[in-house]
């Protein structure tokens, strides 16, 4: 694609996102993957420097928003929410919402190996893009632009965090809030040996805070922890 056509396509995309670019070149740099950069300049690292900057900008925007709106939550909870929001998976989701992956410049080898569908590539490019937006339009514009599009996701993650290990998440929060240890009791099991159902409870100071069942003792404890999180923290999980 000719350079002029590429720049016009990029400018149209930016304007469609509510961004009237002052320095179009910085956005081109933010969307240039190192595989493409090496094809035209072996000394270039593509968008890696802007990715480094954008990582901090995204973290600042999200951290500031959480502080202003959810300061009643303890630091541990806020840290977990932030970690979820700045993960590669989440940033990849955000990049797809604005169809950023269509704008990335990839080298031929990366293109042929399905690089345009690699989460690591377009999540990194999203950070670089935010870095470019910050340089071009300033922090106030960047902050407002980001929140206008993604505030709903932040709110959703606060009320419905992504949890893979309910027992660990429960213990970390209970330790922070009550300085207590969550214990688990196997209350019962039933069924033949090859198809048993186990029933467990999550307990703090002999008070049951959650019940769970499962095909293994471990699964029943995870389910008990999950119910405890709903009971203690009103999490929608």
Image: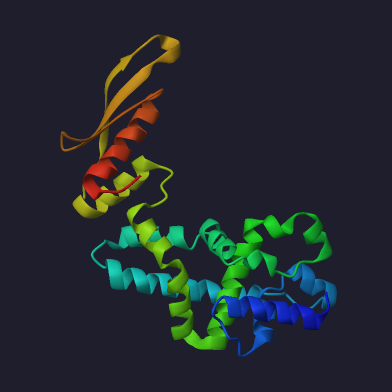
Q: Quadrant of the N terminus?
A: bottom right
- Identify which residue is drawn at 77% across, 67% down: 35
Side of 134 relative to 140 (left or right): right
4 in relation to 190, above or below: below
Side of 199 relative to 207 (left or right): right
Residue 105 position in % (x across, y down): 74, 70
Q: Nearer the viewer, residue 58 or 15?
A: 15
205 in relation to 144, above or below: above
Quadrant in the rendering for residue 89: bottom right
Q: Quadrant of the C terminus?
A: top left
Residue 216 position in % (x across, y down): 40, 24
230 in relation to 222, above or below: below
Residue 208 position in % (x across, y down): 19, 34
- Identify which residue is drawn at 25% across, 49% down: 233
Residue farthest along the bottom direction in this orientation: 22
Residue 9 position in % (x across, y down): 71, 77
Q: Nearer the viewer, residue 82 or 94?
A: 94
Q: How is the image coloured?
A: rainbow
Q: How many marks?
A: 0
- Identify which residue is drawn at 66% across, 64% down: 101
């Amino acid at each position: 694609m000719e350079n002029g056509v590429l720049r016009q396509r990029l400018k149209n995309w930016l304007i469609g996102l509510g961004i009237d670019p002052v320095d179009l070149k910085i956005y081109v740099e933010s969307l240039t993957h190192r595989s493409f950069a090496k094809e035209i300049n072996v000394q270039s690292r593509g968008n890696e420097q802007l990715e480094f900057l954008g990582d901090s900008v995204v973290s600042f925007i999200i951290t500031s928003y959480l502080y202003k709106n959810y300061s009643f939550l303890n630091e541990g909870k806020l840290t977990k929410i932030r970690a979820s929001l700045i993960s590669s998976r989440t940033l990849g989701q955000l990049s797809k919402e604005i169809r950023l992956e269509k704008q990335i410049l990839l080298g031929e080898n990366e293109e042929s190996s399905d690089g345009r569908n690699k989460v690591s590539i377009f999540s990194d490019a999203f950070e670089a893009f935010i870095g470019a937006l910050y340089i071009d339009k300033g922090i106030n514009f960047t902050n407002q632009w980001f929140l206008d599009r993604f505030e709903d996701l932040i709110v959703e993650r606060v009320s419905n965090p992504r949890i893979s290990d309910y027992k660990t998440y429960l213990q970390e929060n209970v330790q922070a809030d009550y300085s207590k240890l969550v214990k688990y009791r196997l209350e019962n099991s039933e069924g033949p040996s090859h198809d048993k159902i186990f029933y467990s409870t999550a307990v703090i100071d002999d008070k049951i805070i959650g019940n769970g069942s499962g095909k293994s003792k471990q699964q029943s404890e995870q389910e008990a922890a999950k119910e405890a999180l709903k009971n203690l923290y009103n999490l929608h999980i």
